[in-house]
Amino acid sequence: MIDKGEEKMMLMKNAFRGGLLILLVALVLAGCSGKQPASNTSSSSGGGGGSQQSSQTSGSPQAQAQQAEGPKYTWRLAETHPVEHPTTKADKKFAELVHERSNGRITIDVFPSAALGEEKAVIEQVQLGAIEFTRVSSGPMAEFNSDFGVFSLPYIFDNDDHMWSFLRGEYGGKLLDSLQNSKLVGLAYYTAGARSFYARVPVKSLEDLKGMKIRVIQNKLNIEIMDALGASATPMAYGEVYSALQTGVIDAAENNFPSYLTSKHYEVAPYMILDAHQRIPEVLLMSKQVWDQLSPEDQDLIKQAAIDSIDYQLEEWAKSEKESEDEVRAAGAEITPVDDLKPWQEAVKPVIELYRDQYNDVLNAIAAARP
Ligand code: GTR
């Protein structure tokens, strides 16, 4: 027999357990869902409108208190380079800033070494919202947004200072903003230095490239550039280049020093010529689908963290460019300097002329940005 007192106690215990269970379920639901939609605000200017400068807007105690509250997110960022590449380091810096400034509410996991796929496929996934972030070259972006094709034109920037003077200006911001029409949000540019050719056999001059099969980033413009140089373009995903060079499917490829080193292409194509034909900036992208579900505060936090990671990328880049050159040289790569770039520039001029009308305004803005 259970007396009245005991019955009451049992009822209370059960009610307590039940309550605890409901509380637990509620907590798990709130904490584990990686993608809870926040208010359905449409994006403010995600491109930065030329404001690629550091600022402290998300640092005030008030702003921080606001950013600590809100939905929790766990997102993925796809990166083609391995962890030691300066650009992967910058992705991580960006993720770190977002994590810190949201007081741990927003986590961005960086997936290096093309673990989530090659750039073209990843961009498609980001458009669909299946991957939230990626850092890619503006090269493949040309196939998704023709405005971005301008960056693949050869010798349009004299050096990195010239490129940054353009990127940080109004037009650079406008280009990032234009990505919204391609279901992407352009958060920030990073540098990728200059691209130069490297081959399985010695290349000491422009003439040596004639007849070679050269791997290029997948876009139409690159095919026209190789034609103008008397070579033949083989568009191919980055991850396939090493074995294509090794087996002789292609004779040559082209890239900057940090990528030449980290991809190990120097092992199979140890002859580089410093013709610096392209300076193609990198872009940090977010899926517009995901962006559109965020509160304006979270959008600002993300955009600002991206902008604030630029200086870090530039520092890491500068260090890595020098160190990787030393390292590939020490490993036996033969690097040929080019004293006079004029013949190279002349050879590819027809490509610029072919695109002059399409890119007239932006080419003028690039010329005007020359420091
Ligand atoms: C690198 C760039 C990568 C990728 C690669 C390539 O310079 O950082 O994002 O585009 O070139 O040649 O495919």
Image (spheres, rainbow, N blue to C red):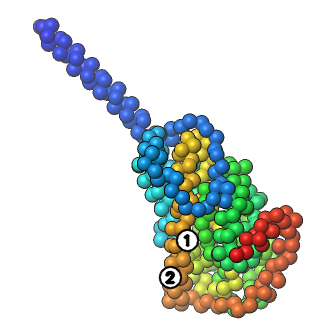
Say which residue appears at 53% left-offset and 37% top-offset.
38
Location of the N terminus (image quadrant)? top left
Which of 87/162 is in front? 162
Q: Is ligand 1 closer than 8 angstroms to the Cβ of mark 2?
A: no
Q: Is residue 179 above or below residue 263?
A: above
- Are the residues tagged 1 and 2 within 8 Å (C-beta)? no
Q: Earlier in the sequence, mark 1 or mark 2?
A: 1
Q: Percent position (x, y) of residue 153?
A: 76, 71
Tell me if I can see residue 236 in this picture.
Answer: no
- Residue 77 locus on image (x, y percent): 53, 56
User: Can I make out residue 69 in this image?
Assistant: yes
Question: Image check: 310 left or right of 360?
Answer: left
Callout 1 amino acid: Leu
Question: Quadrant where the C terminus lies?
Answer: bottom right
Which labelled disc corresponds to residue 323? 2
Between 34 and 53, the residue placed more toward the observer is 53
Say what amino acid the circle numbered 2 marks.
Glu
- Spot occupied by residue 324 in the image (x, y as percentages of width and height): 52, 81
Residue drawn at point x = 51 percent, y = 78 percent: 319
Q: Secondary structure at mark 1?
A: helix
Locate residue 358: give its quadrant: bottom right
User: Could you tell me which residue is drawn at 56 percent across and 36 percent down?
Assistant: 39
> Badge 2: few (under 14), some or many (20 or more) residues near its Cα, within 10 Å?
some
Disc 1 packing (10 Å; few <14; some 14–19; many ≥20): some
Q: Is residue 356 above or below residue 26?
A: below
Residue 176 in the figure: left or right of residue 147: left
Can you identify the residue that label 1 sits on?
Answer: 314
Q: Residue at x 46, y 50 (%)?
A: 60
Residue 36 - label = none
> Closer to the observer: label 1 or label 2?
1
